[in-house]
Amino acid sequence: MLISIAIENFKSFDKLTSFNMIASNKLRNNKDRVFHADNVSILKSAVIYGANASGKSNLIEAFRFIQHCILSKKIPLKSRQLYCKNKESNENRISTFEIKMYINGVCYAYGFDILLKEQTIVREWILELTKSDEFKILFSREKGKFELSEELRANNDDMDKFKIYSEDLSENNSVLFLSEMNRNKKITKDSKLFFFKEIYNWFSEDLNIFSPDTPVTNFEYYYDVSSLKIVKHIIKSFDTGISDIKIRELSLEELQNKLNKEIFKDIMNKVKEKTTNNNINGFRLSMRSKNEFFNIAMDSENNELIITTLSFKHGKSLCDFDFDEESDGTRRIFDLLDILLTENKNSVYIIDEMERSLHPSLTKHFIELLNEYHNKSNIQLIFTTHESTIMTQELFRRDQIWFISRDELNNSNIYPLDRFNERYDKKISKAYLEGRYGAIPIFGSFDIEELI
C-alpha cells in the first residue's frame, strides 16, 4: 500500500512537497475506509482536486517517473527537462523523489536524489519504519559508496553478493541500485537482501498508473465464465442499457482489420514470445485497445489460436453491438472495472481524471461500489478529478480529499481538506466552488470592446 510520496524540483513542484495516505487520528467516521497496520493507519482511497494547470497531472507524472526509472533500469532521456523551470537556478539543483510503502507487514521508504540535467544519480536509500515510529537505514548509496546496515546481520553469502553488485555499479551513476539488484539476480526469501526484491515487485506488480491515453491493458477476467457473470451484474447497475455480454469468436484476419499495423505486430510478437521463448503449450492473452476487447488463447491439443471478443445486447434489440459501438462513458466503465475485479489484493491504482466521459452519478456510483467491494482488502485508489458533486463527507472522509493549487510563483502546493477542520454536516462541494479551499481557477477580467 502507498503511504506517501515526496518530490522536490520536478515540473511544477519546486520545494519538497508531500502527499500522503495516512489516516488522521482525529477522525472517527468511516473506519472501513482505513487499513490499520501495527504502526500506521493507511487510507484506502483519496481524491485530488485542483484547477487546470494546478499540478495534478504533474503529481501523477512523478509516480510514473519513479516507476519508469526503476523498471526500465535507466533514467529517461527526457528527464533533462523535467526540473522545475520556475527558477533558472533549478536546472543545476538536485531533484528528490521518495515513496513510502507498506509491504507484507513492513513500512519501507525508498528514494533517490538525481541531477536531472545530467541524468546523474547522487544518492539512493532504503529505510524501514520500526515499531517505535523511527526509520532505520537498510541501504544507502552516495558518491559511489554503497552501504548495507549492520543491523541486518547478513551472512557472508549475502555480503559477498552485495559487494559484487555494488562494485559492478560503482562507476555507473545512471542506474538505480534497486534496478540492478533485480537484473537477473537470484535473491531468495530467506536472504537478508530480499527487501530489494519486495520493493521492486511493489513497483512492477502492485503500482498501476493510468492516464486517459493508456493504449493496452490486461483484462483477463472478462473471459472467465464466473467473472463475466459479475461483470454483467455490475454493468447493469450503471444503467448503460446493456442487458447481456457475450463472447464471440474472431478470425485472425478480423483482428488484424480491427487494429492498426503497429499494435497488431506487437500482439503477434507477444504471442510468438509466449509460444517459443517460454515454451508454453497453451496460454491466454487478454488485452484491450482504445476501442476493442480481445482474447487470444492457444488450444493446447492442436496448437491453434482461438481469438474471441465481447459483444453486447441492449434490451430487446435484435442485433448485438461491438465494443467500439458503445459510448465513451460505457467504455470508461470497463476501464475502471479492473479496480473492482482484480485478484491482486495489494494493488495501488493511480488515475488521472478518473471521471473522464462519465456522468457525475456514474462516478458517484463507482466510488460507492469501490467502498463496498474492497472494505476488507488492501486495494488503494488515488485519482484526480474536477467533479465537485462527489466531494461529500458521505463518500470521503476529510483526510481523503486533497487539493493542489499554484502560488504566486507558479509553484504547486498540496494540502488536505482536513486542514480546514470542517464540521461533519458541512456541504464542502459548495464551499470548494466558492473558493474556501483554493485550488479553483481565478479568472482575469478585460474589456472586450478594447480588443475589437
Image: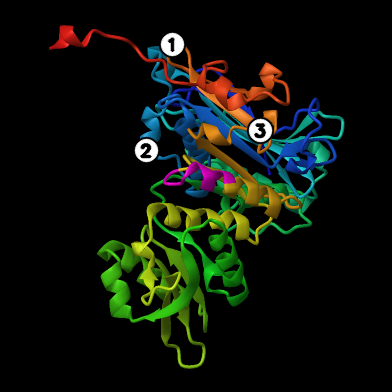
The residues bearing labels 2 and 1 have C-alpha atoms spaced at a distance of: 27 Å
Which quadrant of the structure image shows residue 43? top right
Task: Point out the tag, 2 or 3, that comes first from the N-terminus.
Answer: 2
Q: Which of the pair 201/293 is nearer the observer?
A: 293
The dot on residue 129 is none
Image position of 35 (left or right of 177): right
Q: Residues within 10 Å of mark 3 (few under 14, many from 20)?
A: many
Q: Secondary structure at mark 3?
A: helix
CA separation, marks 2 and 3?
35 Å
User: Badges 2 and 3: C-beta atoms under 8 Å apart?
Assistant: no
Task: Give, as a single range, the part of the protein colored magenta.
Answer: 356-364
Where residue 171 sits: x, y (%)? 51, 37
Q: Residue at x 47, y 65 (%)?
A: 242
Task: Indicate the amino acid at tag 3.
Answer: Gln
Q: Which mark's residue is nearer the viewer, 1 or 3?
A: 3
Residue of label 1: 409
Q: Residues within 10 Å of mark 1 (few under 14, many from 20)?
A: few
Pick whichever of labels 2 and 1 is earlier in the sequence: 2
Q: Is residue 145 visible?
A: no
Residue type at the position of mark 1 = Leu
Which of these two is toward me, 62 or 149?
A: 62
The residue sitting at 42% across, 79% down in the picture is 248
